[in-house]
Amino acid sequence: MELKCKQEDLLLGVHAVNRIVSTRTTLPIIGNILFETTKEGLKLSANNLEMGLEVNIPASVKQEGSVLLPAKTISEFISKLPSIDLNFKKNEKGTVTINYKKGSSLRINGLSPEEFPVLPKIKDAKTLTISPKVISDMIKQTIFAASQSEDKYFLNGVLIEIGKGAKGDDSNFRLVATDGFRLAKKGEKIDGVNFEASLIVPSKALSEVIKMTQNAKDNEELKMIFSSEQVAFKYGDSYLISRLVQGQFPDYKQVIPKNSEIKIAVDKNQFLEAADRAAVIAGTSANIVKLKIEDRSLHIIASTEVGNVDEELDVEVSGAFKDTIAFNVRLLTDVLRALDSEKVFFEFSGPVSPGVIKPADNSNYLYIIMPIRTTDTGA
């Protein structure tokens, strides 16, 4: 095996696959990265048995071959090299020599790739093509609502729902995430959807999709390939495959409020800044803030043993609402950071009913947040 490549190309590829490498495993071989020549150049692969990633980088191949190299060592070393050409050569014993400037080289002991788990091919797959920027934005606006608890394994991912939506929903591609305390739903209408399906994709895999597509352009495409057990995302020179979360996702349609007593239009950034200040006080106890509407003002209140804060914002109010409603402030600020809209709508029906947050410029996004029962919210 012998090839030549640029340090910056190799660094991007190594860093990408290194995120997949498992550091806690009883199978040491998956702590390595597979280097494998192709007709186009060099392919780097990592596989932690739950998720795998392949990245192709440009390289001039003189002799074909493959080798496993320790992920941590090669990643750290390549990151410390200057932006220069690198010459790789593997000898018959599996030792790789990397020459990177006159008189300087790294010799690193490689392993045979024979025992390395090959990334599986998806059988009986369905395929969907979507804009990488569109799916990346959809993920960013939902993934934060997924559960982090291992006890709720079926909520550790995001539901991808394909096909006709519920009444009043004209989307045919939807992402939904919930942790039991809040729910985020984002829908889009895309071309080429002629089937119905639903799958729960692990949050870790979707986080990698965001990283894969961070430099995507408007005219590019991403392919999603899936079966009942696996899902893959193909974009540019990267191919990500993951197992699906097996389990029954909750019927989220049952928790969407049918109507509301009051609707408030608020400047997103003003609310977020005020909520962040209130969170300083709320964070000294249970992260509770209370929202109170008075005429055309919204008060964000936090009170603990440390002190109290009362932030007043001018808002547009439609409807009547006399109660105070309490929320975990983090669940409020999470969604506001994910939305691009300058104005958002808050909808409430009572101190113990779910609150709804929607961006003013997008009817296909919905965020539902459960209130907190307190002694002075009428609960």
Image: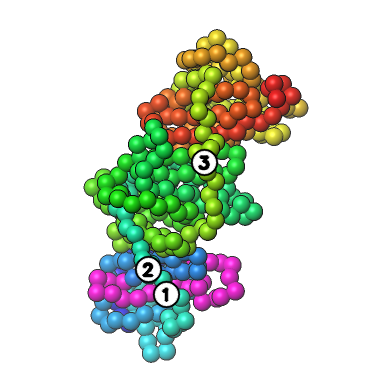
Residue for point 66% across, 25% down: 302
Q: Which residue has dot 2 on it? A: 123
Above-or-below relation of 181 to 86: above
Type of the residue with mark 2 = Lys
Mark 3–mark 2 Cα distance, whole angstroms, equals 29 Å
Q: CA distance from mark 3 to mark 1?
A: 37 Å
Image point (46%, 69%), residue name: 47
Which residue position holds label 3? 252
On-image quarter of the C terminus:
top right
- Magenta residues? 16-42
**Residue annotated with mark 1:** 118
Q: Residues within 10 Å of mark 1 (few under 14, many from 20)?
A: some
Question: How crowded is the residue under tag 2: few (<14 C-alpha within 10 Å), some, or many (20+)?
Answer: few
Whether residue 42 sits left or right of residue 298 in the image: it is left
Q: Amino acid at mark 3?
A: Tyr
Q: Secondary structure at mark 3?
A: helix
Name the amino acid type tagged 1: Val
Image color mode: rainbow
